[in-house]
Image: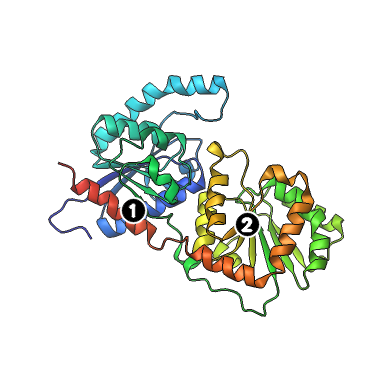
């Protein structure tokens, strides 16, 4: 807690783009305010989810112009490089005007310029890396930051003073208990907030045989708003028993959905993996092949090595029978699922937001 004789720290949180970056950032921001009375300012871009989520959470947001550098066309890379000097100057001005005591970079487009400006101004900087392989912005600044918070141990080598804190995950995921031993098997297919096209295409034709092979199995398939109707139609056309499957565009209360599932089939974004670990859920992970730096495959490999998950790469799904056989094998082996659940919990990190917030305040207090 902040002592009465210490001024409230002023901290800039920079970056975003996806929910995997901004949701943990907001959790840390709330903890900084609640436990350290901190004053918070976000730096982001208009194209990222932060433009909507940060103001909705009640925090101030400054927008800068900067685009991607990694896995983009030459024209986009040139345009971004041309924007960088101005974005650095803009971030430097924001840091100066806000009188920031520290800058916390969470990855994403705005993180690089903001962290670079902090380093140039000799303002303490701390990086957050949710993936097993850091993104480009974090790789560039990793050796210059005062501290880093990572989710997977393999990422620590990219940073100075890295600590494995995990990703902030809502408390209700940690509170989940395993379904009763006599519960009917239930498969949750979760493609993220937008759904996963490959899940929506492959699973409906496989459903009849899978439901026949696993007595009592039910399937809940989250398909995304744009594809829910077509995915529902594909399940219906497959002839699968309509009382044993359901397609939803979006799922509310994910902790409750995880609770009911014996197995979760999902992508392997950092936030999803962190929630699976916190919930102690066995999973079949299918990394998004186009993810930057192939970070989803690296995330999944950590879980596989821990015995918490199975993995199929997208390129292997040219043979859909592999997906069907893997699901059938997992769902018909309760002992293996129980073991995977226990191993998943070993990858969880309780109190991540508190640890990250405390570390940020420590580097502020250590400033000369």
When asked about the image quadrant of residue 138, the answer is top left
The residue located at (55%, 19%) in the rendering is 75
Asked if residue 348 is positioned above or below residue 48 in the image, the reply reads below
At horizontal 79% and vertical 63% (from top left) the residue drawn is: 210
Instruction: Give how far across and how far down residue 346 sits, in percent.
Output: 47, 64
Q: Is residue 329 left or right of residue 353?
A: right
Secondary structure of the residue carrying numbered label 1? helix
Image quarter in which the N terminus is found: bottom left
- Looking at this view, is 96 or 196 the one in front? 196
- Please tell me which residue is depicted at 58% across the width and 45% down the height of the picture: 297
Figure quadrant of residue 208: bottom right
Determine the image quadrant of residue 323: bottom right
Which residue is disc 2 drawn over? 310
Q: Position of residue 290 (x, y in %)?
A: 61, 38
Q: CA distance from mark 1 to mark 2?
A: 30 Å
Task: Provide residue 368's location: percent of width, then percent of height.
Answer: 14, 41
Which of discs 1 and 2 lies nearer the camera? The answer is 2
- Callout 1: few (<14), some (14-19), or many (20+) C-alpha neighbours within 10 Å? many
In the rendering, at what x and y percent does residue 94 appear? 30, 33
Instruction: Give the SS element for disc 2.
Output: strand
Does residue 227 appear in this view?
no
Of residue 23 and residue 119, the one placed in the foreground of this image is: 119
How many marks overall? 2
Residues at discs 1 and 2 in contact (Cβ within 8 Å): no
Q: Can residue 88 be seen in the rendering of this structure?
A: yes
* Neighbour tally class for label 2: few under 14, some 14-19, many 20 plus, Cα within 10 Å: many
Q: Residue at x 74, y 69 (%)?
A: 217
- Residue 103, compared with residue 228, is above or below; it is above
Query: What mark, if any, has residue 328 been given in the picture?
Result: none
The earlier-in-sequence mark between 1 and 2 is 2
Residue matched to label 1? 356
């Amino acid at each position: 807690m902040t002592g009465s004789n210490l001024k409230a720290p002023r901290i800039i949180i920079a970056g975003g783009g996806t929910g995997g970056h901004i949701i943990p950032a907001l959790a840390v921001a709330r903890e900084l305010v609640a436990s350290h009375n901190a004053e918070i300012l976000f730096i982001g871009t208009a194209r990222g989810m932060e433009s909507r989520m940060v103001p909705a959470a009640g925090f101030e947001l400054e927008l800068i112009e900067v685009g991607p550098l990694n896995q983009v066309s030459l024209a986009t890379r040139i345009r971004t490089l041309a924007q960088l000097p101005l974005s650095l100057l803009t971030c430097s001005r924001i840091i100066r005007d806000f009188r920031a005591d520290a800058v916390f970079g969470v990855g994403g487009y705005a993180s690089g310029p903001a962290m670079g400006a902090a380093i140039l101004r000799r303002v303490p900087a701390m990086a957050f890396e949710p993936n097993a392989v850091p993104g480009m912005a974090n790789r560039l600044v990793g050796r210059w930051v005062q501290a880093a918070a990572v989710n997977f141990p393999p990422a620590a080598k990219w940073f100075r003073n890295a600590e494995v804190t995990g990703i902030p995950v809502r408390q209700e995921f940690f509170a989940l208990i395993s379904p009763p031993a006599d519960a009917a098997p239930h498969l949750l297919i979760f493609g993220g907030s937008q759904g996963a096209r490959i899940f929506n295409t492959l699973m409906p034709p496989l459903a009849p045989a899978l439901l026949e092979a696993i007595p009592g199995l039910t399937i809940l398939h989250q398909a995304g708003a744009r594809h829910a109707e077509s995915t529902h139609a594909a399940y219906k056309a497959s002839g699968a028993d309509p009382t044993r499957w359901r397609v939803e565009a979006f799922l509310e209360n994910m902790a409750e959905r995880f609770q009911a599932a014996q197995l979760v089939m999902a992508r392997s974004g950092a936030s999803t993996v962190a929630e699976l670990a916190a919930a102690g859920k066995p999973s079949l992970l299918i990394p998004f092949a186009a993810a930057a730096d192939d970070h989803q495959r690296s995330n999944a490999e950590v879980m596989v090595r821990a015995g918490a998950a199975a993995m199929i790469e997208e390129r292997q799904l040219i043979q859909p029978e592999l997906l069907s056989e893997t699901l059938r094998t997992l769902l018909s082996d309760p002992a293996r699922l129980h073991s995977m659940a226990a191993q998943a919990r070993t990858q969880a990190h309780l109190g991540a937001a508190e640890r990250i917030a405390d570390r940020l305040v420590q580097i502020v207090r250590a400033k000369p």
